[in-house]
Amino acid sequence: MLKKLLKYDMRANMKVFLLIWPALIIFSLLGRFSLTADLQGRLDTIFSTATIIVFVLAVFAAFLFSIVLAITRFYSGLLRNEGYLMFTLPVKPWQLIISKYLTSLITIVVTALLSVVSIFILCSGIPGFTADLHFFTAFMNREFHAGSYIMLALLMLAGVSTSIFQIYLACSIGQLFNKGRILFSALFYYLINVVLSVASTTFAIIFGTSRTLQEAVISIFEGMHIQTATFVALSISLLLSAALCCVYFFVTKYILSKRLNLE
């Protein structure tokens, strides 16, 4: 059943993004043409500036739509009138959540990848870009090994997943109120960020004043090669992000299973 839910959600998203994604490549090609075209005088400046501005706006719009759809598909699909239908289906709440999550994750990841590709297409027309790319690649190869690249990719996915589930949790808490649900959802999203900021700041203060913790961390990384140390640091960050993501998911699942309050 999860497969059918995912197919339904992806089909709804594709109605929008099958127009947005090709537009990114088209605008990047126009931008590259404007940077390499041999136009005369002021016309060259106006054309290149206009195409680059349009490209930047297209990238911004693509990410904005992916975030907006992640919110609206979850809120409108599960917490408003449509929720009466979705929660009568022979599926469990976690399947509904995972379907919305995977659809949002796939949409955001594909948007990010196409944005990177389109930026490379655009910047390939800029003199010196190849040299800068070689320098960056050499730096990354010095700091990272193959495992670190995989861990970095997983960490990025975990970061996006955590952000998505944080939105879902805030919306789920907001729907507990009979009035001002959107306002309360935004408020709880802000409060969650405040709690995380306070927790991270508190940990930083404790770590900065605790010689025992500092020596423990030094003992872990002491003698490690820079690439190994990078891999370990990324692994720890991944575990923390995954743990936070699980907390968001299970609390959201509990609210939708036990405390659902549809409009």
Image: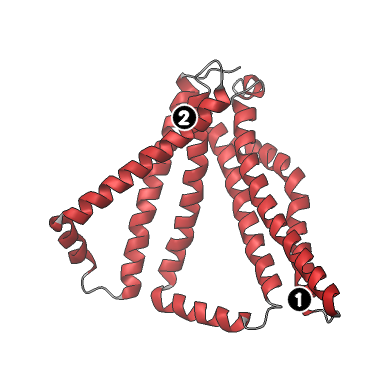
**Residue 171 appearing in the image:** no
Classify 10 Å Cα crowding around label 1: few (below 14), some (14-19), many (20 and above).
many
Looking at the rendered structure, the kind of residue marked 2 is Lys
Determine the image quadrant of residue 225.
Answer: bottom left
- For label 1, the residue is 35
SS of the residue under disc 2: helix
Q: Residue furthest left?
A: 212
Looking at the image, is mark 1 or mark 2 earlier in the sequence? Answer: 1
Is 212 or 252 nearer to us in this picture? Answer: 212
Question: Which residue is found at the position 57% from the left and 44% from the top?
Answer: 102
Asked which colour scheme the image uses, the reply is secondary structure
Looking at the rendered structure, the kind of residue marked 1 is Leu
- For label 2, the residue is 253
Horizontal relation, residue 209 to residue 107: left or right: left
SS of the residue under disc 1: helix
Determine the image quadrant of residue 8.
Answer: top right
Q: Are marks 1 and 2 in contact (CB under 8 Å)?
A: no
- Locate the C terminus and report the quarter of the image it occupies: top right
Query: Where 11 falls versus 257 (above or below)?
Result: below
Query: Where 76 falls versus 100 (above or below)?
Result: above
User: Residue 259: x, y in percent?
Assistant: 47, 19
Classify 10 Å Cα crowding around label 2: few (below 14), some (14-19), many (20 and above).
many
Query: Where 234 falls versus 142 (above or below)?
Result: above
Is 13 or 203 nearer to us in this picture? Answer: 203
Question: Which residue is found at the position 26% from the left and 73% from the top?
Answer: 224
User: Residue 49: x, y in percent?
Assistant: 76, 67
Horizontal relation, residue 7 to residue 196: left or right: right
**Residue 87 appearing in the image:** yes
User: Residue 132: x, y in percent?
Assistant: 56, 80
Q: Residue furthest front?
A: 42
Horizontal relation, residue 37 to residue 14: left or right: right
Determine the image quadrant of residue 123.
Answer: bottom right
